[in-house]
Every structure is written in C-alpha cells, then in structure tokens.
Amino acid sequence: MAPVTLGDLARAWIAVGTQSIGGASSTVYLMRSRLVERTGWLTRREFMESYSLSQLSPGIHLIALAALLGHRLAGVRGVLVSVAGMMVPAAIITVALSAILIGVTGHPLTHAALAGVGPVTAGMTAGLAVISARGTVRRGLRGALDVAVIALAFMTFVGTSVSPAIVIIGCGLVGILLLRHERPETERAAGEE
Amino acid sequence: MSDPVALFFIFLKAAALGMGGYGSLPLLREDLVLTGLATDEQLIQALAVGRFSTGPNGTYILSLGYFVGGIGGAIAALIASCLPPLVMVPLVAVARGRLLSPGFAGFNRGVLLAISGLLLAFGLAILVPTGRSGLAWWHIVLALGAMAVTVQGRVHPAILIGVGAAAGLLLGR
C-alpha cells in the first residue's frame, strides 16, 4: 500500500471532525469507517489496540485515539494533523453554535427553553455516570469495593469542600493498592466514551 | 471577560485530571462556577451546545471557554484539552508494558470510579439551581427520564435536549 500522505490524513480527520454529530459513538464509527474500512490504512486489530490504549489517557480519550492513530500512520506530523484535523473543525462549529446561543439568550422563549434543558442535562450527566460505573464495577465482593469508592467520591463532593482533584488522585492511589486485580472493561464502553 | 492564560491553566488542570469527555466537569465547576468566573447556567448551556456539536464528547469545554473568555477562551480551552491526551504517544512508545500492568490498571479503575461518583453528584448539583423559583415536579421527571434514556443509549442526545427545550417552553413560562 502507498504511504499515507498528510493531505489524505487531514481530509480524513476533517471529515470526522465535521460529520460526527452526537459524541463518541458517531466519532468512533467515522474514525473506523475512514481509516479502516474505506481506505485500508489500518487493520481492525490495529485500530482496536489503539482504542484500548486511548482509554487509559487523561482528558478526552478520542483525542488520544486520534493522536495514536496519527502516529501509527505518519509519525509526529501525523499526530498533529490528526488531532488538529478532528478538533479544529469541531471547535469552529462549537463556537459558532455558542455564539448563536448567546445571541438569543436574552429572549424570554430561550429562557423558558433553557429551564427544560437544565434538568435534561443534569439527568444525562447522571446517566453518563451510570454508564461509566457499569463498565468499571466488577462482580461479587470486588464490586462492593468498587461501589464503595463511587459512594465515597459522591459523598465527598456533596458533603464536603474537598477538591474533586484530590478525590480523583486519592481514588487513583486507592486503586493501586486495592483495585488492581484486573483491567477495566474499556472495550465494552466503545460507543459510550 | 476572563484572561485566556488563566483560563488555559484552569482547563489544562481539568483535562489532565479528568478522564473521558465529561470527567473534567466537577473540576471545572469548582474552578469556574464556585469562583464566580462562570455560572451553572453557562455550564448547562455549554453542555447542551456540546451535545449538538460535532467531534468527541467533551467539546462542551470549548463552548464554556467561549462563554467565559470569548474567542481567546475557546482557543485556550481547545489547546488545553488537546495537550493531556497527547502524552499517550510517548507513553505508549516507551512504557507500553507499564501501562498494561496491574498497578496502572488499579489506578485507572480508581480514577474512573471516582469520576463516576463525582459525575453523579455533579448531576444533582446542577439540577438544584435549575429551578430558580423552586424545583418543580417536571424538572425531576425530565431529569430522571433523561438519565434513563441516556443509560439505555438508543436516543440521540440532541433529541433529548430538544425534548427538554420543548418541555421548558410548555411548562417553564
């Protein structure tokens, strides 16, 4: 197969960045479609291996996936082209939508609509927490320990002024000591993260 | 309008410590809302915009950056959210074996569990200020319904936001 040019790579990632409405599942679908099925640049195994590693990343996992896939295909320049190709168009679209929202925020109808959007957003966030927990909590007694860590983080946020940063780092350290038996089922969350 | 450099470091901290597109939410609420730089309403609006936008989960950060810092804030949020995931490229190259070790898996699990608990609490925290004149029954119905539908995963998030907006127009005036 001919080497992938940076121009080809940029076009593929710009397509992902502009067409993936709806978050992770549609973004992963488009990535796989563009880089594996349509072009044959990567095998499914290579894609899934990078996907699994990206789930260990800090921050937005799919940015890590774009970087890892870009590196496989075109080295360091591939990293930059892939991440920028996906994120810059998405950023432009996001800023444009935000500017439109600011433009209509003062209108009474917008105000009323946002009164309904708030609870939906709250519920969706809680739903994401359940999805994340479902993919991470183990079965049996180990699962009880996992749930206790979730409850501890919840109670700390609700009942104390301890920074979430401290909670996250603290639970990570607890994880090294007590939760190290097996890896989280990251692949199960393929369409959810 | 907030200083883009200060915003950059706030977003960088949130992106570095949060895992996943929404893992940064509790951190950003602490550093932006509780310090008065943003409001819960702006956070909710940013989440809604993120659900309509393209790209991965987590583009709400760019919208929030724009709300609090204009174009400079959005650029700060974009750069800050891209940097932490990039560490995976050298990490995978030099320490792939360690990333797959039981200790790192335990750390990863602990962080993911903490974020699950924090996101659950965050959902509760942004539900309460929604009802400025008191939390109405339909706020709670909408939140529980959105939670159930999100867990089920069969309805596009933008449709859920649209249903919420329609309910607000009917019941929120």
Image (spheres, grey):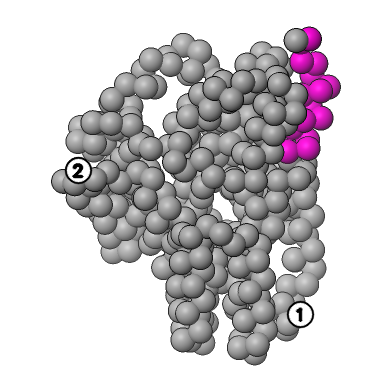
Q: Main secondary structure of the magenta part?
A: helix
Could you tell me which residue is drawn at 69 percent across and 38 percent down? Answer: A30
- The answer, for residue B63, to whether it is visible in the render is no
For disc 2, the marked residue is: A142
- What stretch of residues is rendered in magenta? A2-16
Count of numbered circles on the image: 2
Q: Nearer the viewer, mark 1 or mark 2?
A: 2
Residue A161, picture quadrant = bottom left
Q: For this rendering, which residue is in front, B68 or A97?
A: A97
- The type of residue carrying mark 2 is Arg
Q: Label 2's element?
A: helix
Horizontal placement of B168 versus A81: left or right? left
Could you tell me which residue is drawn at 40 percent across and 56 percent down? Answer: A130
- The answer, for residue A185, to whether it is visible in the render is yes
Could you tell me which residue is drawn at 38 percent across and 62 percent down? Answer: B121
Q: For this rendering, which residue is in front, B134 or A37?
A: A37
Q: Position of residue B118 (x, y in %)?
A: 38, 55
- The type of residue carrying mark 1 is His
Question: Within 10 Å of the Cα at label 1, are there few (<14), some (14-19), or many (20+) other Cα atoms?
Answer: few
Q: For this rendering, which residue is in front, B146 or A41?
A: A41
For disc 1, the marked residue is: A107
Q: Where is residue B13 in the image (x, y as percent from the top left)?
A: 49, 40
Q: Label 1's element?
A: loop
